[in-house]
Image (spheres, coloured by chain):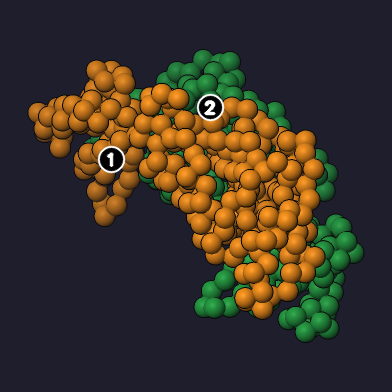
Chain colours: A green, B orange
Amino acid sequence: MSHGDIITAAVLVIGDEILSGRTHDRNIGAIAEHLTAIGIALREVRVVGDVRDDIVAAVNALRARYTYVFTTGGIGPTHDDITADSIGAAFGVAVDIDPRAVALMAPVYAARGIELTPARLRMARIPEGADLIANSLSAAPGFQIGNVFVMAGVPDIMKSMLSAATQRLRTGPKMNAVSIVVHRAEGDIADLFAAHQAVFPDVAMGSYPSFADGRYRTELVLRSVDAKRLEEARAGLARTLAERELN
Amino acid sequence: MSHGDIITAAVLVIGDEILSGRTHDRNIGAIAEHLTAIGIALREVRVVGDVRDDIVAAVNALRARYTYVFTTGGIGPTHDDITADSIGAAFGVAVDIDPRAVALMAPVYAARGIELTPARLRMARIPEGADLIANSLSAAPGFQIGNVFVMAGVPDIMKSMLSAATQRLRTGPKMNAVSIVVHRAEGDIADLFAAHQAVFPDVAMGSYPSFADGRYRTELVLRSVDAKRLEEARAGLARTLAERELN
């Protein structure tokens, strides 16, 4: 691939606990930051429950559309962990205990004095044709099948797996971002900002308002893969804000 | 509708800033908790960027499938706020400045000494046939069109709008949840837990592991709309854990 190709991704969060509000997701933000930093454009996120048909439909929709799909959740030892079987169904392949996964788990479990029960061996169930993703924290691996990376839902384990998976990923140009903060309401800078966007159609511009300590605050964020062009846009915006005494 | 009907919902988060990782979403968890508390089952969440075709496709997919859709983000005054126009496109209706929205905004802006510029009037652009959703914080309203509720992305404003929208929502039976915490690894209770799920197929059971201070912790969560049945399942599980000395 050429350096300039955009690599895209989707995240699929799997778990009833997110949809019920019992657990507040922390993986979406962590994966988004990581992908942006390495030059992969996250384009869509979905959250579905522990429902096989919903997982299959989402995985198949997303893997057809984006370069990569990253899933989190549902690969533990209990009966509500149905991600591996659902991914197998999505790809139309069998899922069974994988000797490579057992080989990763057995020595770690033995060293910790934990028995490799049938329930724990559920975590070694891997779809046919998948490659394993190492888990440096608790041994039971994630896996990659096609362009889909299947990771744990526990944030620290997810991060370990994402780190292990990263070396396999093609990456594109990195998106650079700069921001200018003005202590003005969005409405005060909207016209100027839209005019500036029109001059730099190749630089993505977004405005993010907040209100704290009785003061308006608006962060103007500019993003581009072209660092030189980005700096031109930033400098031009800063100059215009200063000229209108809006900085 | 009868009391027992399940009311379902989806959330659509709109915004480049979530996908880039710049902003970590706080609305999904807040909406999930609120819907669960009032008896609406959140079934799916999607996050898309500030891209009209992506917003239109997601809104149309979700509104056809669930009782309600709640969107957050993209209804401010700047050029990157394209949610109202995208929702209009999804419903095939015109979007224009709505006198009812102006009437809500004008007195509040006047009292605060803020001019109602053309940029700010962008926030009064509402799709034809929509009902407004009040915003008690900053006046510029959200709106409801069909079964879609369009809300701001700023968490406090979103909450104000969600609260205002709630009176219009049909609700179903409330999902009750109880949990039992054991200081065991998931693998130690997985077989017992699966057997218990088989005895109570009508009670949803999930297991959520964590590891802190050198100690395994697993939270077993049981959920049902039937409080009596839920208590039977909880008591039975507690008894079985005690019998096996796993409590």
- Identify the residue under disc 1: B219
**A91 or B141: nearer the viewer:** B141
- Identify the residue under disc 2: A55
Q: Are labels 1 and 2 assigned to the same chain? A: no
Q: Which residue lies at the image location 52% right of the left edge and 21% below the top edge?
A: A53
**Vertical side of B246 occupied by A162: above or below:** below
**Vertical side of B162 occupied by A129: above or below:** above
Q: Is residue A187 visible?
A: yes
Is A206 situated left or right of B164 in this image?
right
Mark 2 is surrounded, within 10 Å at the Cα level, by few (under 14), some (14 to 19) or many (20 or more) other residues, namely many
Q: Is residue A71 visible?
A: no
Is A17 situated left or right of A115 in this image?
right
Q: Secondary structure at mark 2?
A: helix
Residue type beneath disc 1: Glu
**Residue A167 picture location, percent across and down:** 62, 44
Mark identifier at residue A75: none
Q: Chain of mark 1?
A: B
**B20 or B143: nearer the viewer:** B143
Is B138 situated left or right of A18 in this image?
right
Q: Which residue lies at the image location 61% right of the left edge and 32% below the top edge?
A: B62
Q: CA distance from mark 1 to mark 2?
A: 23 Å
Q: Please count the marks in the image.
A: 2
**Residue A25 picture location, percent across and down:** 47, 47
Q: Which residue lies at the image location 30% right of the left edge and 25% below the top edge?
A: B203
